[in-house]
Image (cartoon, helix red, strand yellow):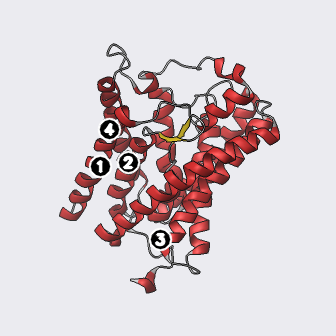
Amino acid sequence: MSIKDKKLLIIGLTIAIVIGILAPFFASTNPDGLESTAEKLNPNVLESEPFINSIMPDYNIPGLGETPFSGVIAIFIGIIIVFALAYGIGILLKKRS
Amino acid sequence: MHIPDGFIPISQCIVYYVIVIFVGYFAVNWAKNNLDEKQIPLLAVLGAGVFAIMAMNIPIPWGTSGHMIGSPIVSILLGSPFAGFLVMTVVLIIQALAFGDGGVTVLGANIFNMGIIASFLGFYIFKALKPLVHAVPSVFMGSFLAIFITSIACALELFIAGTFPLTAGLVFMGLYHLVIGIFGEGIISTIVYMAINNLRPDLINKKSLDLKREN
């Protein structure tokens, strides 16, 4: 990997992690556009149970409660998983010469 | 715009899964024939960035919030809507399985909306506008219109599902995502495009975007 690529990875991941650290503090907790529409038009549907219990529901670590710290850790883990998976899929599917 | 479980009947969920698998086949073929090794770091970084920014809901009026999708700008930068599809599919699977953001039964529908519709709209609107105006406003319009029209498609799907009434669903979904599209998707995508264009213009897929003459 070239130095330019390493630089891109470091800058890109740093920006992602900084956004991830800020998000639990600054993100709006209001319902999103879809939930808000459902609240107005068909609130019953919001009572539906999730099909599976996710590992880190609502971007929080179970046991750490719904605190910004818990959110930061959860989002950080997500960033690393997505980065690794996307990189892996790239390697797996790339053009072969 | 992550649809939760229970919003779409299972029979219709299956239809979206089938469409996603069908498009996924072509996306894999696209990657095997076109995905250059030097694009992989950008692909992975964009995935990480898109995941992070999707956790940052920005407030919009009417007690509502929203976040960008990200697949339009990924498609534009990497030169194919299939790139946006692949990145968004990874992000949406992790969001659904690990974070409960978007349901598992409706994962196909969410990938159909944010991975397929948004990617193709963003990429082709950008490509259509590019010869008429500069690349930067084309990025803005492509990204903005992509999320806005995707929200219209989402409202139609939820009408077919029997969950939202037609007119009110279209009005609310359209109105909210018009705002999110301008202040979220449109502006942030434009900033990302300008930053990559300054930092690593060599990584923007110029061949498929006919940008050769500009640089």
Residue B95 in percent (x, y) is at 47, 33
Q: Say what amino acid the circle numbered 4 marks.
A: Leu
Residue A15, disc: 1
Q: Mark 2 against mark 3, which lies toward the viewer?
A: 3
Q: What's the distance in space between the residues labelled 4 and 3, CA to CA?
A: 27 Å
Asked if A50 appears above or below A72 in the picture, the reply is above
Q: Say what amino acid the circle numbered 1 marks.
A: Ile
Q: Say what amino acid the circle numbered 3 marks.
A: Val
Pick out the residue farthest to the top.
A63
* Disc 1 to disc 3: CB gap under 8 Å: no
Residue B157 in percent (x, y) is at 74, 40
Q: Quadrant of residue A50?
A: top right
Please determine if labels 1 and 2 lie on a single subunit: no
Q: Earlier in the sequence, mark 2 or mark 3?
A: 2
Element carrying mark 1: helix
Residue labelled with disc 3: B136
Whether residue B120 is visible: no
Circle 2 chain = B
